[in-house]
Amino acid sequence: MSASKSQHTQHPPVAKRDRLFGWKEGLCALPLVAGLALLAYAWSPASTREPAPATAASVAVAAKPAASACVGVWRRLDGDYTLAIQSVREDGVVEATYHNPKAVHVARATLQRTPTASLEIELRDTGYDGNRYMLHHDAANDRLTGTYFQPAVQRTYQVQFARIR
């Protein structure tokens, strides 16, 4: 024999691994395992499950402020101006009265259910030719804050109302 062949050693043949299951059996067991997992989930208490994701409808409902938060009697902080909001209809129409200190006709009052409850009050009376309040309810401080526009002089003022009732 040559020297190169004597240095080469032969390895014993590799035996096939003994497996409990082959790939075919594992593939057949997969639907059974998935079914058992689904059954275990269905029987688990609801409190251990993930909450359902928010839908657009549930987010929209959560974003709408309570219109009832604006109902009440409000006094402007810089004078004797009183705004009384009696009710807010589902369509956003507001029943309101305004006094300075005498009654001033409220021509239009509406509430838009934005995240901060946007209230628009238009006054039409002697000396009030379309004067307009644009107010938002500040829930943290329970105030109506916003602007008051006087078209006769083309001026806009920052205003705040505090709840008195």
Image (tube, helix red, strand yellow):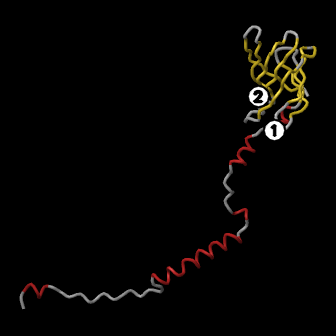
Q: Amino acid at mark 2?
A: His
Q: Please identify the quadrant where the N terminus is shown.
A: bottom left
Q: CA distance from mark 1 to mark 2?
A: 12 Å
Instruction: Give the residue at the far bottom of this rendering.
Output: 1
Residue highlighted by disc 2:
136
Instruction: Give the residue at the far left of this rendering.
Output: 2
Q: Position of residue 101 (x, y in %)?
A: 92, 14
Q: Which quadrant of the figure has residue 102?
A: top right
Q: Position of residue 56 (x, y in %)?
A: 68, 48
Q: Is residue 14 left or right of residue 126?
A: left
Q: How many numbered badges does the structure rendering display?
A: 2
Q: Position of residue 53 (x, y in %)?
A: 66, 54
Q: Is 129 in front, or is 161?
A: 129
Q: Is residue 31 left or right of residue 114?
A: left
**Taking 155 as reference, is 53 above or below it?**
below
Q: Is residue 7 left or right of residue 78?
A: left
Q: Amino acid at mark 1?
A: Ala
User: Neighbour class for label 1 at 10 Å: few (<14), some, many (≥20)?
Assistant: some
Residue 98 - label: none
Tell me which residue sits at (76%, 12%) in the image.
151
**Taking 105 as reference, is 24 above or below it?**
below
Tell me which residue sits at (84%, 38%) in the image.
90
Q: Please identify the quadrant where the C terminus is shown.
A: top right
Q: Is 48 in front, or is 34?
A: 34
Q: Which quadrant of the figure has residue 108?
A: top right
Tell me which residue sits at (24%, 87%) in the image.
11
Residue 66 - label: 1
Q: Label 2's element?
A: strand
User: Neighbour class for label 2 at 10 Å: few (<14), some, many (≥20)?
Assistant: many
Instruction: Give the residue at the far top of this rendering.
Output: 153
